[in-house]
Image: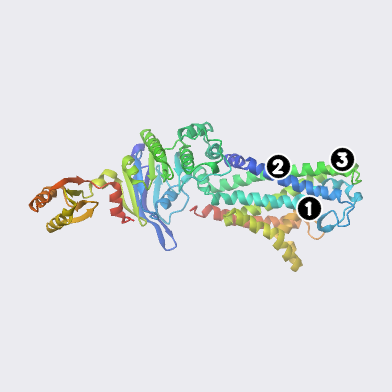
Amino acid sequence: MIRVVIAELRKLRRPSLLLGTIATVGGLSALFTSIVFLMINSESGNSKRGERVGPEELSQALGLVYGFKLVGVFLGIVALCIFASQTAQEYSLGTLRNLLVRQPSRMKILAGKFIAMKLFALVMVVFAGVLSIGISFALAGRAKVDTTLWRSSAAMHILFESTLNIFIATLCFGAFGMILGLLLRSPISAIAVGVLWNLILENILAALINSTAKWLPGINFSNIGEGGNPLLSYKHSLAVSGAYLLVSGALAAIFFKRRDVAN
Amino acid sequence: MNKAAIPAISASDLTKIYGERAALSHGSFEVPAGSICGFVGPNGSGKTTTIRMLLGLITPSGGTATVLGESISHPEKYLPKVGAMIEGPAFYPALSGRENLKVLAELGGFPLSRVDELLAKVDLLDRGGSKFKTYSLGMKQRLGIAAALLPNPELLILDEPTNGLDPSGIQEVRGIIRDLADSGTTVFVSSHILSELEMICEYLVMLREGKVIFAGKTQELLSAQKPMIIAIPEYDVDLANLAAKINEIGFQVAVVNGSLHIAAPKEASAEINRKAFDAGITLASISIVQPSLEETFFEMTGDNK
């Protein structure tokens, strides 16, 4: 399987994809983190859904990762698009037949692909984190945010925990994209369905019927990235997300293993 | 068992059904090891479906087959020794030709040093660093052939390898196929250029509407076909008269471009000559022609469009 991972990484590190992703992730990370600090006194808010976060709150240990956590859900959407397109394009380009002739074990192809994309997602999350934290330190003085607690061991613990949670959430979104790619076999369809569902349909559904929010995959993936909230516990989101991915992943894997490669 | 005694490909009643349509119905044939075998049939006759089943990409609805002595239900046992290009070259457009080959070399566990060797073999070394999407159709096709050669295969399966190639490219591919066959590789090649196949293939498998209508030596197929006598009268005005005279002795005649194509055994040529002489017609030439593979193909498949 290691051969599949190495071959996949060669595809993933092509400049157009790697640099494009780094630029997107970097741009998002810089944008969200900058908004938190540069709009700290803005009446229209400096956090999600127009909330205001002041210097006192940002001066806590959690302030170190505040911007990074805001960008988490968007890292997930980027991962969803990459995982979906990298999987579905094997069908649309007809390259799957080449892969299967050189590696007939379909499960090894699938697992190797996922591992390689996990590594790619890890690079993406770490880059976004480093950039966000760097920007946070750079803009803290201007926003009159005290960074003393950002250097404490508690802040390091929060940083590690947040990175892990954002990474898990990014993988959940990515796996969701990969499953869509396997089932729909078209990069455009897989990305469109994935993005539309997570960014629009789930929010409409949750707004119309509040009780559904607890059970929708995208909301639970995002909640993992945020480390849970008072309305939706981290453990619940982890369990619901795991269940979704386990069932849909198993179905997609069965389809992939048994389906004829006829294109 | 002697390795050469095991056919490179052996199919028995191999069947693939999609809905109510049989893409391949009870296909049985053998491809002897070390041979070059042509795989011909009109579009939609089941060639690509058969190749896909042999490569483990689709599951047969019935029947069995072996490749290099291993059942096609275990493609992992024989695919490391098989090179294939199916339905044209498919690669990642944003990667260079070289990077595309490296992906496949890494996947198959082949040394990366093979990549430049093969790029040189298919005359793509200079353009190996260019993105695949910038390649011409002929270059794409050559890259596909290079990818198929990565494992130094015992069996090479090529589906329309000369599509998009210019005459010199076709000649190069023919040379590559012959070199491989000389070194003991079995080549199973489908092509629409039947004159090419006639030149290089010792064996043929012919399909029509999902059925194998011939599997055997090319020479056996061609020699089993009735030869044709072609008579050309000195003057075109005599064509109709001569055709009528030949009809009288019971042979079918067609007028084609100023000549008469007569479906008759070669022994009949003397009698035809005599009939023409009796009718006061001088023949400019009379010859016996063995049908080409193309003519035989059209006759057997009814695909003379």
> Are the residues flagged by discs 3 and 2 from a single subunit?
yes
User: Contact, CB < 8 Å: mark 3 with mark 2?
Assistant: no
Numbered mark located on residue A151 in the image: 3
Q: How is the image coloured?
A: rainbow
Q: Are marks 3 and 1 on the same chain?
A: yes
Foreground disc of the pair 2, 1:
2
Tell me the distance, in whole angstroms, between the alpha carbons under discs 2 and 1: 19 Å
**Residue occupying image coordinates x 79% and y 55%:** A228
- The residue singled out by tag 2 in the image is A123
| Residue A173 image point, x, y percent | 68, 53
Callout 2 amino acid? Val
Residue B35 occupies which quadrant of the picture?
top left
Instruction: Of the two numbered discs 3 and 2 on the same chain, state the one appearing first in sequence.
Output: 2
Mark sitting on residue A210: none
* Residue A251 location (% of width, % of height): 59, 57
Marked residue nearer the N-terminal end (3 or 1): 3
**Marks 2 and 1: CB-CB under 8 Å?**
no
Secondary structure at badge 3 equals helix
Residue at label 1?
A226
